[in-house]
Image (tube, helix red, strand yellow):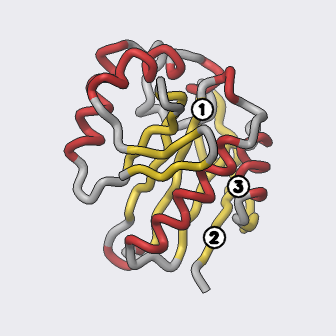
Amino acid sequence: MKIDFGEWQIRSLHPADAPSLAKYANNRKIWINIWDRFPHPYTLQDAENWIQEAMESKPETIFAVASDTEVIGNIGLELKQDVQRRSAEVGYWLGEPFWGQGIATRALKMLTEYAFAEFDLARIYAEVFEWNPASCRVLEKAGFEYEGRMRKGATKDGQTIDMFLYSLTRD
């Protein structure tokens, strides 16, 4: 899969992406804002393992955010099951040098358009740690609506914190 948006793209991950993925992912400022399954420090081996997982996932739901020359982040969906089978959780991160440029917002818009077109989804949602207002702004700019606060919804870096829930639904 490949979707271009200006000088950036969302595309499938490839083994050759491991060095740039590891370079940008090995950052505590990224780790502090995402799930614990994302290791820190983030090594080349971690990048290779993640790329292998992405390449084996069927359907494909884990993608690179990239320029023509390197991967600068990830974006993906976790398709839900059972009674939530028409829902997906979205997650994303960008390397710190690319923050504040609108890239995450544009990538999120492109991914949600793709997801609603390719999967039988009624809802895409995201959960954001309370200390990450930048991610809240990305979601809001991409059309997601704030649904509420999940009090004491996560424990990260030794702190139990609130989470904010955002969603976008298909009309």
Mark 1 crowdedness (10 Å alpha carbons): few <14, some 14-19, many ≥20: many
Left or right placement of residue 115 versus residue 124 in this view: left
Q: Is residue 40 above or below residue 155?
A: above
Q: Which mark, by number, is residue 168?
A: 2
Q: Does 132 sit above or below residue 149?
A: above
Q: In the picture, residue 131 is in which quadrant?
A: top right
Q: How far separated are the C-alphas under marks 3 and 2?
A: 9 Å
Answer above or below: position of 37 versus 133: above
Mark-to-mark CA distance, 3 and 1: 14 Å
Q: Quadrant of residue 142?
A: bottom right
Q: CA distance from mark 2 to mark 1?
A: 21 Å
For marks 3 and 2, the one nearer the N-term is 3
Residue 97 relative to residue 88: left or right = right
| Residue lying at 69% horizontally and 49% vertically, measured from the top left | 105
Q: Nearer the viewer, mark 2 or mark 1?
A: 1
Category of crowding for the residue at label 3, using alpha-carbon neighbours closer than 10 angstroms: few (below 14), some (14–19), many (at least 20): many
Q: Amino acid at mark 3?
A: Leu
Q: Which of 19 and 9 lies nearest the eye of the viewer?
A: 9
Could you tell me which secondary element the residue under label 1 belongs to? Answer: strand
Q: Front-most of 90 and 9?
A: 9
